[in-house]
Image (cartoon, coloured by chain):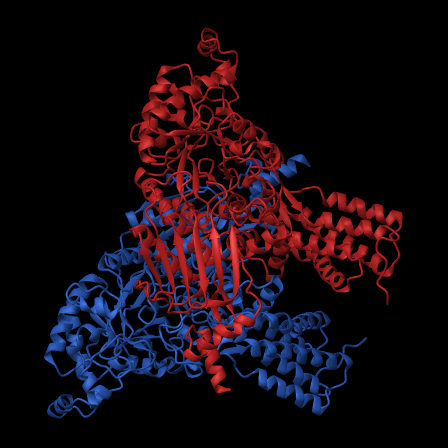
Chain colours: A red, B blue
């Protein structure tokens, strides 16, 4: 007994007596395989019985090609492994003969990371050690993340299951775009998001750096760009260089975007001569599409852009340069006689032609400075050079059209993180599905991948992580893994595990919420706070562009993001679980008493919740706003209980009862305070079932 | 209706239409006073009806004496106010005539902050503005924290209640000691703890920098101290200078401690000639009192200390210098013939005399380098100079003795954060209670205050905040507020509010736990994780020094702190609430059916908890360790339900039933896996009540 206890104690403290270690490998071989929680799913997996113990003696050795980046990667790997396990590893790197994990790298990767570089790797884990092989450091970076995801606590301590993995990405361009202009996002926040990208094997950070609301890069050539166009919120060139090194260390390219000729009001504050209107201009505070646009008819515009692109092309080493190009409404052009004259004299039929003229000029400048152009759909105009990459915000149709004409494309339509879609909905979008599915194999090769997009009207440093993660992990899997990896149940299970691990990196997508709710609740009692949390758990912000359309006052960059709609998650886990539970209950003809009891407990809690929350609404204006939603939740709970009662007794709801409940539910289904009450739809299913004579017969006694 | 909605929307977004603002002040005057959540409690408060709205137009102006530190303080104040409200304030400082908060500072404080400098302030808040007056910047720093604590969300937006405060500290020395030697604590963690100290008006950071387990300061004079004595984990002198500026900005003195002649093994790794034994020495990995001690008979020791103290006295500007002095077991002295001879030739009767000789020599060196000595009880020996400060770890008796003989003292006994006491227990300890209460008024003035102590055997950067906060806020109040401020219910209410606000500063004492539990749980199901959390909520680590005594294997600095005992809080809020609920129920002769129902819900949850947790114990070794405690919790739940049943039916438990339950409860009261199950004691009260015929008559029908 004493031995067993001490043995257990030793094991849980990460120390393995020799005998225990010997005993460890053999019983495992008879055990079932350990569960895997890998995301993105690797291309090929062969799992074997047994596992590699991870204890304080774990070491990693680098063989073959080495470079400081690999050394740093192995240190970060050990740091992360420490966070996951709390084990204290020796810092010294060990020799390959004795190391637990032996990394072999064939050769260097390109000094400036290129599109399409080899990221493949093999990883073999046995009960006695692990081997990682990759052609170049990029593959090593990817494999180390896979290894970290393999490590789990087990009955015998921390361990990685025995496994052989051969892996490579499906798409070469797997990006996340962050708009740092509408709300400025500091570098520490961006860096932790790079850490998250590395964890899920994304390899392009698309930095949306300029907008009507801000020009966020220091320009030494044109200092009034950042001095007058950023409210003092910009990145210095030194910070940017450091950030690019940070990204390269993680196998991530940094593609800068300077959006033009529209979305550029902030440029004009310092340089009004670039604009098509007469100004004066000030940094835009509102959201939307605005009139200001560069003057495409002025040679001074191109001279300016030539010099700016020269400066920025040097600052950002990536071989791609994003020139934006989206959403020009043409109003300033229409109002400017000189521009109208220019159109006529140059035989440009409309503003699209005028923008095409502008795009061609700018593309030449980008080419002149050694870069290839990326642009939104609008830059895809007849005759543009073939090295251009079209980023499609409009949809798969426009992406397919690019492919058909021999152009490279990446998909962002379907991956807009700010629209509040579920992970499953993003996950179901594939760059090669829909119209793109009809492309020839050669044309399909032109579809390079995709990018998720975090537009920042309604995010700030406090809640941005929660708007990106964990859903971005599902999108990352879409870009990395085979098209056939598409089961959303499996995705959700694995995503919830990865979500926890992402927080070890410093991402705050889970911890942010309590603080925001606490701000809303003030000095609430524990009961009141619990009620607020119960409500927050089952609501989501209104979807797509409804937030703008239903705003109580016109939203601007000056308004604080401190409302319940800013604090709640974009996808309600509790709402999804409840809905699954209802489906399970109905699928079993309402005969599953355990599920019935779970539903009843949940519905009872909701039905009583408003009573606990209502007093708080009298104390806090930020709760007051949600008072109708809170009442709705209790109404939904009560309606659900009535439906369950009817089902339990086997007496269908009378039609007046049914229509009364339907009317309650249809009221609760209407968003209020920009919040959607998720359980309303599932409860409607219960009421429907309770209204039919035979849909749900009572359980036999 | 539209107007009301828009008005509400404007208010919750932090914009006040003029009319609404006008309306705001007047109805408030008829309202009850807003609740205050100040900690520490100010000396004098006069609250008035009404409140000062805090919106995006809030500005602060500095008048009178100004200096960069005040400017930085006002910027930090706005940052913190932003975190609390999410409001976006203009960055420009405004002129006094228009500012919302006008700060007046009479004159500068000392360049090097001195013990006993004036920290008083007055703060007046009216519905139209606020005024802060202080003699010097220290009072301003204190007052700004009070103002931040006043700000709350209200039905009309964020606001600070109308109030007039005159405030000053009771004690001049209000410290927190952190031992960074047994576990190294990085500077970012220390800095956020300085932020926390500032929030609760503490003014001394006592930096325990050397120990058997590590010498944590770069010495340019004796580089082998940090090179060989720290495992590479030390602070550079540049970092220390930066840290001291950071502390000074917050009105906090930094007192360094170099513990000698014992607790100094780490010194001897590089400089074995300092020791009384023959070595060789290595950095100590275990906890406890060890034999190595400096050779007090060698002139070389004093030459070395002279040069080291010279270097460190320059690095640390505070006029106090802590020389430790605690816990020398004398074994190395006894074993060294030269030392024994020295004792005889110098007429030193015992090792206490020898240590006194050492202390006097070192004290002279400290004085020579312009500092006054602080030392633990052991340095208090007849004839030491009167400028010494005795830090009492032994208790109030020894503190009182110092006072009686005209020496300054500070109390730490009763404030050891690592012992796992409740906040209430620390709160009840007063530097001037017990033996010190008998001091004359003049003697009482010699008691300068106290220090809480965070010894670091069982803390690391991940959980240290949770071992310090929020309990340290209660101790801070003890040192700042009047002795009569001693109601622990009020303390707990206010501490829970402050605890939330402390997290805005970056402290992790609340957010740390989910991550640690997640590590323990691995990829648990949501139900399993909830069960683990339920268990974690009602257990505490074993108290005092029991952790060492009951360790399953000998603890060392190499063992990971990843067990449940490392993850659970030191004080179970849920346990305390349950106990209060039981007391309330019994006080009402068990007739309070609402309370009975709450108790029953809680007990039922516990009684079922083990069934949910047990499967997880099969999957994770870190849960497996807690399996007996989990069973105990369910047994406690079941026992409590049986007691409630007996009370409800009015039939007392039969004596065999009672003794069976008693035996269960006495088993559950025994700590297992170093965890104390808190609700066991309260359930015992229920069982006792259920066993007496008349203690709890059933409620009348």
Q: How many numbered marks appear?
A: 0
Q: Position of residue A634 (x, y in %)?
A: 72, 53
Q: Foreground residue, B14 or A283? A: A283
Q: Is residue B399 left or right of residue B88?
A: left
The quadrant in which the C terminus of chain A is found is bottom right
Q: Please identify the quarter of the rendering in which residue B466 is found.
A: bottom left
Q: Is residue B350 above or below residue B149?
A: below
Q: Nearest the camera: A640 or A208? A: A208
Q: Name the residue rendered at 69%, 54% in the picture.
A: A580
Res. B93 image quadrant: top left
Relative to A409, A76 lies left or right: left
Q: Residue at x 46, y 74 (%)?
A: A12
Expressed as whole percent of the image width and height from the top left, the position of residue B603 reads 66, 74
B476 over A473 or under it: above or below: below
Q: Position of residue B484 (x, y in %)?
A: 46, 71
Res. A618 visible in picture:
no
Q: Observer-nearest residue: B525 or B225? A: B525
Residue A363 % position (x, y):
40, 23
Relative to residue B561, is residue A422 depicted above or below? above
Residue B195 shown left or right of residue B238 in the figure:
right
Residue B310, visible in the rendered structure: yes
């Amino acid at each position: 007994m004493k031995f067993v206890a001490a043995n257990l104690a030793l094991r849980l403290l990460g120390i393995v007596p020799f005998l225990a270690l010997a005993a460890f490998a053999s019983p495992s071989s008879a055990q079932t395989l350990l569960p895997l929680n890998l995301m993105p799913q690797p291309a090929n997996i062969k799992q074997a019985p047994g596992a590699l113990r991870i204890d304080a003696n774990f070491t990693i050795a680098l063989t073959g090609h080495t470079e400081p980046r690999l050394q740093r990667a192995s240190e970060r790997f050990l740091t992360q492994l420490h966070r996951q396990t709390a084990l204290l590893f020796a810092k010294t790197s060990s020799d390959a003969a004795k190391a637990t994990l032996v990394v072999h790298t064939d050769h260097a990767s390109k000094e400036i990371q290129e599109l399409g570089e080899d990221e493949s790797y093999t990883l073999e884990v046995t009960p006695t050690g692990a081997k990682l092989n990759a052609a170049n450091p990029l593959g090593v970076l990817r494999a180390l993340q896979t290894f970290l995801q393999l490590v789990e606590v087990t009955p015998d301590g921390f361990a990685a299951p025995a496994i052989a993995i051969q892996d490579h990405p499906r798409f070469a361009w797997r990006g996340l775009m962050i708009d740092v202009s509408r709300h400025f996002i500091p570098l520490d926040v961006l860096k932790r998001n790079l850490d998250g990208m590395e964890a899920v094997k994304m390899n392009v950070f698309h930095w949306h750096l300029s907008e009507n609301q801000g020009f966020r890069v220091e320009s030494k050539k044109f200092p009034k760009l950042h001095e007058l166009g950023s409210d003092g919120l910009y990145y210095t060139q030194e910070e940017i260089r450091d950030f690019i090194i940070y990204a390269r260390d993680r196998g991530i390219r940094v593609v800068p975007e300077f959006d033009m000729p529209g979305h550029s009001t902030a440029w004009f504050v310092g340089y009004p001569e670039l604009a098509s209107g007469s100004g004066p201009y000030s940094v835009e505070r509102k959201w939307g599409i605005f009139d200001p646009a560069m003057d495409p008819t002025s040679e001074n515009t191109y001279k300016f852009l030539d010099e700016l692109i020269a400066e920025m092309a040097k600052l950002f080493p990536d071989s791609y340069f994003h020139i934006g190009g989206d959403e020009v409404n043409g109003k300033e052009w229409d109002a400017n006689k000189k521009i109208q004259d220019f159109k006529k004299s140059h035989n440009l039929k409309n503003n699209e032609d005028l923008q095409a003229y502008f795009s061609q000029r700018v593309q030449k400048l980008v080419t002149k400075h050694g870069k290839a152009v990326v642009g939104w759909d609008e830059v895809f105009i007849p005759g543009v050079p073939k090295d251009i990459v079209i980023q499609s915000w409009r949809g798969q149709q426009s992406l397919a059209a690019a492919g058909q004409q021999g152009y490279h494309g990446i998909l962002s339509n379907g991956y807009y993180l700010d629209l509040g879609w579920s992970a499953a909905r993003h996950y179901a979008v594939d760059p090669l599905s829909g119209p793109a599915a009809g492309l020839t194999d050669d044309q399909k090769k032109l579809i390079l991948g995709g990018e998720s997009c975090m537009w920042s009207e309604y995010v700030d440093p406090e809640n941005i992580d929660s708007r990106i993660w964990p859903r971005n992990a599902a999108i990352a899997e879409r870009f990395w893994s085979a098209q056939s990896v598409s089961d959303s149940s499996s995705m959700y299970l694995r995503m919830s595990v990865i979500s926890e691990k992402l927080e070890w990196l410093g991402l705050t997508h889970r911890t942010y919420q309590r603080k925001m709710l606490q701000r809303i609740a003030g000095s609430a009692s524990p009961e009141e706070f619990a009620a607020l949390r119960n409500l927050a758990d089952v609501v989501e912000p209104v979807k797509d562009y409804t937030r703008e359309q239903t705003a109580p006052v016109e939203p601007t960059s000056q308004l604080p993001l401190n409302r319940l709609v800013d604090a709640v998650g974009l996808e309600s886990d509790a709402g999804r679980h409840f809905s699954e539970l209802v489906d399970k209950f109905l699928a079993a003809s309402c005969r599953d008493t355990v599920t019935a009891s779970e539903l009843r407990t949940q519905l009872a809690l909701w039905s009583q919740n408003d009573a606990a929350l209502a007093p708080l609404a009298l104390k806090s204006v930020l709760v007051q706003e949600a008072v109708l939603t809170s009442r709705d939740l209790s109404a939904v709970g009560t309606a659900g209980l009535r439906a369950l009662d009817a089902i339990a007794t086997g007496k269908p709801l009378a039609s007046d009862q049914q229509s009364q409940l339907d009317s309650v539910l249809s009221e609760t289904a209407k968003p209020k305070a920009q919040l959607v009450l998720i359980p309303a739809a599932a409860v409607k299913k219960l009421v429907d079932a309770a209204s039919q004579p035979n849909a749900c017969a009572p359980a036999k006694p």
